[in-house]
Amino acid sequence: MNELVIGTRGSQLALAQAEWVRRRLETLGFKCRIETIRTTGDRLADAPLPEIGGKGLFTRELEQALLEGRVHLAVHSLKDLPVELPQGLRLAAVPRREDARDVVVGRKLAELAAGARVGTSSLRRAAQLKLLRPDLIIEPVRGNLDTRLRKLEAGRYDALVLAAAGLHRMGWMGRIAEYLTPEQMCPAPGQGALGIETLCEGPAAQACAALDDPATRAAVTAERTLLEALGGGCQVPIGAYAEQYNSALCLHAVVVAPDGSRAVRTRAEGTPGEAAEIARNAARQLLAGGAHEILESFSRS
């Protein structure tokens, strides 16, 4: 293969992520170029995510391009990539993770007055915000990262809750007012990690394998397996965050009622090689603790 074509969305952040992958592959001796592809989520940029719903809003068109051979690898924010991949595709690499935490941009939570407007497009973030500060007004905000920040600067919100990783990758750490701990705001499964998707076989999969980070792979395997075991998607308020302590992998997980009235939490651990079983244990604990009632409310809606 003379050239690897990297598929990506066209936002500033997505292009920065694809450029990082391109540089890494070129240091390994591969010639690469980047191809931008517009996804359904990009076309419906002003619609609230809970309303348009569905899996693969930000990945489906990239996967189709892979299957048709128009690109050889697709770079995703892993939290956007559904757990179940189309037949013929695989998660070829999960590079070393960026900061997985959520952050507040604008002002710290403790500095926000009662009734302050906080923007987020995530039900997971909104539900956990209602646990932390039930006096705040949570309003939807869509658009690329730079678009959301412009809306904040225009005064449409008093603060935003965003992923730290995107701001780090763009070099915009100075915008961050406060980092939220996983105990305060449990991240989305796969948050902060990139997912590099390829055909199951072929030179692109072999090339990308060199970018895989085993510690990150184990952590996100636990998080994504938990999501699969609970039957949730990106529009269900499920948080999952796994990290390694010495030789142990510890998974923190939470299912939160959308109105913030209830949260079911658990913690499970084992070895990195047991990542999937750790997640299944955590899922059983959450369901036994009452998470099934929260999840069933989504299936009925």
Image: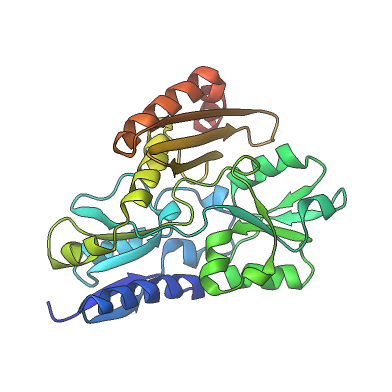
Q: Is residue 157 above or below residue 224?
A: below
Q: Is residue 46 visible?
A: yes
Q: Is residue 199 above or below residue 180?
A: below
> Which percent across, then down, holds residue 102?
60, 53
> Which percent across, then down, holds residue 39?
41, 65
Between residues 61 and 210, which one lies in front from this camera angle?
A: 210
> Which percent across, then down, holds residue 301?
55, 33
Between residues 294 and 225, which one lies in front from this camera angle?
A: 225
Residue at coordinates 32% horizontally, 71% vertically from top-left? Answer: 7
Residue at coordinates 33% horizontally, 39% vertically from top-left? Answer: 272
Residue at coordinates 39% horizontally, 42% vertically from top-left? Answer: 224
Residue at coordinates 32% horizontally, 76% vertically from top-left? Answer: 22
Q: Is residue 171 above or below residue 240?
A: below
Residue located farthest toward the top when viewing the structure as drawn: 288
The quadrant in which residue 2 appears is: bottom left
* 5 with respect to 259 (left or right): left
How many numbered circles does the render carry? 0
Q: Is residue 37 visible?
A: no
> Which percent across, then down, holds residue 228?
38, 36
